[in-house]
Image (cartoon, helix red, strand yellow):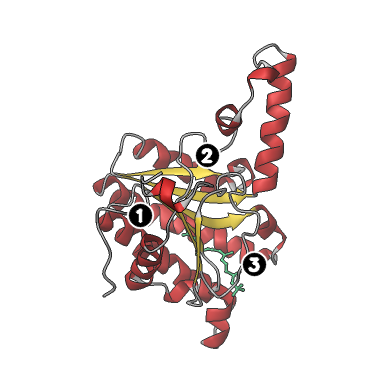
Amino acid sequence: MQKIDPHHLPGHIAIIMDGNGRWAKQHAMGRIRGHQKGAQAVRTAVTACRELGIACLTLFAFSSENWGRPGDEVNALMALLADYLDKEAPKLQKREIRLSTIGDIDRLYAPVRKKLLDVKKLTQSNDKMILNLALSYGSRDEILAAVKKMLADSREGKLNPDAVDQDVFGRYLYTRDLPDPDLLIRTSGEYRISNFLLWQMAYTELYFTDVLWPDFKKDDLLKAIAAYQGRERRFGLTSDQISGRK
Ligand code: FPP
């Protein structure tokens, strides 16, 4: 097992779970089987993060662009999500994990939306970890919606345009109650951000692995955290400033 420093954990890990389709192809299976294996890897990742003491885990489960996939794949992903919520709700509650979402969840199929709202309500007081699912999420849409709402609030006298700064802007995003991610993991050997948390990832450490999402295990998570722990985060300052020497 990869060794990590338990006192220097990323508070918020975001994951682009990529490679379900390629995993299925490698195993001579249909894409939907790949997503089913991917849902199993979600369970593994949530358990591992909870055990490690990660405060927030954001998973890119369905992008706004994913609506363009073949109908049977979209249906299967919605069904998988519903099944995940049914089976995991008691476990989330037992492990004191709060479910949250970012994205346009009104577009989701009605039964899935209802289950999401129910599980969010059930787990709303939990404070050991946040499991944040990005669903029907696209970062450019999120930013545009924030700008439009700010303009509307300004017209209605609820927002002073001169007072707009990064904090004010951040409060118009889906992520208003979440810290920015410290570590982004993308699986499957793709080196892209794919319209995910563009504003929020200004200073996030990026980690890419060739492992396909259905094969992603606790040790792969530990490797990503170890890589993060080996980085120096300077936030635009110098190395000496960060280490306190000036
Ligand atoms: C990307 O792989 C994965 C997705 C678009 C869906 C992610 C969904 C899951 C992991 C399962 C359901 C989620 C939950 C939270 C229960 P891809 O299909 O783009 O893979 P490919 O690039 O190899 O074709």
Circle 3 residue: 72
Rendered view: 178 above or below 36: above
Instruction: Give the amino acid at mark 2.
Output: Thr
Rendered view: 176 above or below 86: above
Instruction: Give the amino acid at mark 3.
Output: Asp
Q: Are marks 2 and 1 in contact (CB under 8 Å)?
A: no
Q: Which mark is residue 88?
A: 1
Lower position in the chain sequence, tag 1 or tag 3: 3
**At x 62% / y 49%, what residue is drawn?**
198
At mark 2, the secondary structure is loop
Front of the two marks 2 and 3: 2
Quarter of the rendering containing residue 68: bottom right
Quarter of the rendering containing residue 52: bottom left
**At x 33% / y 72%, what residue is drawn?**
219
**At x 47% / y 77%, what residue is drawn?**
211
At mark 1, the secondary structure is helix
What is the C-alpha distance between the residues marked 2 and 3?
30 Å
Circle 2 residue: 175
How many C-alpha atoms fall within 10 Å of the one at disc 3: few (<14), some, or many (≥20)?
few
Q: Position of residue 72 (x, y in %)?
A: 64, 67
